[in-house]
Amino acid sequence: MLNSLFCFLDSPKIKAFSFPSDIDTSTPFVSASCVLSKGTKPISFEWLKNGRSLSNGNRLAIRHEDQFTILEIRNINASDVGNYTCLATNTFGSDKYTSLLVIKCKQQSNYFKVNY
């Protein structure tokens, strides 16, 4: 009897993700999870906004695990609008997925001062 060991060596494959559609400037934070459906470890992750690499900072928190990464943006403002890309890479290849973050404008109420 011949015993065979099959080992699959895969490049990463990212599952689709999106940002919530109801974000406005009063939203305290927004997050996106980039999860792999497959990929041989070790895998490195990177987040990009409009093609530029992101890193942990004042309003950004990025956490990487073996099979996923999470991006959190705090104190949402208009400058956060853009295309956010998760890039996953290993020895066998890479994959990326991009999602658009849109921020709704809050309709402002007009207040009028009335003199009596």
Image: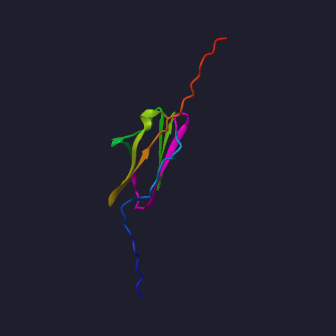
Q: In this picture, is 79 found above or below 111?
A: below
The residue lying toward the viewer, choosing from 37 and 9, is 37
Quick one: which residue is furthest to the right in this view?
116
Image height check: is 42 above or below 106? Answer: below
Q: Residue at x 45, y 33 (%)?
A: 78
Residue in the picture at 40% in, 55% down? 43
From what the image shows, is residue 39 above or below residue 83? Answer: below
Q: Position of residue 65 (x, y in %)?
A: 48, 51
Judged from this view, the residue extending furthest toward the top is: 116
Please provide percent x and percent y for residue 98.
39, 50
In the figure, residue 14 lies in which quadrant?
bottom left
User: Number of callouts in the render?
Assistant: 0
Residue 63 at least partly seen: yes
Can residue 91 be seen here? The reply is no
Q: Quadrant of the C terminus?
A: top right
Q: Identify the residue at the far bottom of this view.
A: 1
Q: Nearer the viewer, residue 87 or 81?
A: 81
- In the picture, the quarter occupied by the N terminus is bottom left
Q: Residue 50: where, in percent of width, then height? A: 35, 42
Residue 66, given in percent of the width and then of the height, sits at 46, 55
Does the magenta run of residues contain 113? no
The colouring scheme, among rainbow, by chain, secondary structure or one colour, is rainbow
Residue 41 part of the magenta-drawn span: yes
Q: Is residue 109 left or right of residue 17?
A: right
Residue at 44% over, 58% down: 15
Span highlighted in magenta in the image: 24-44
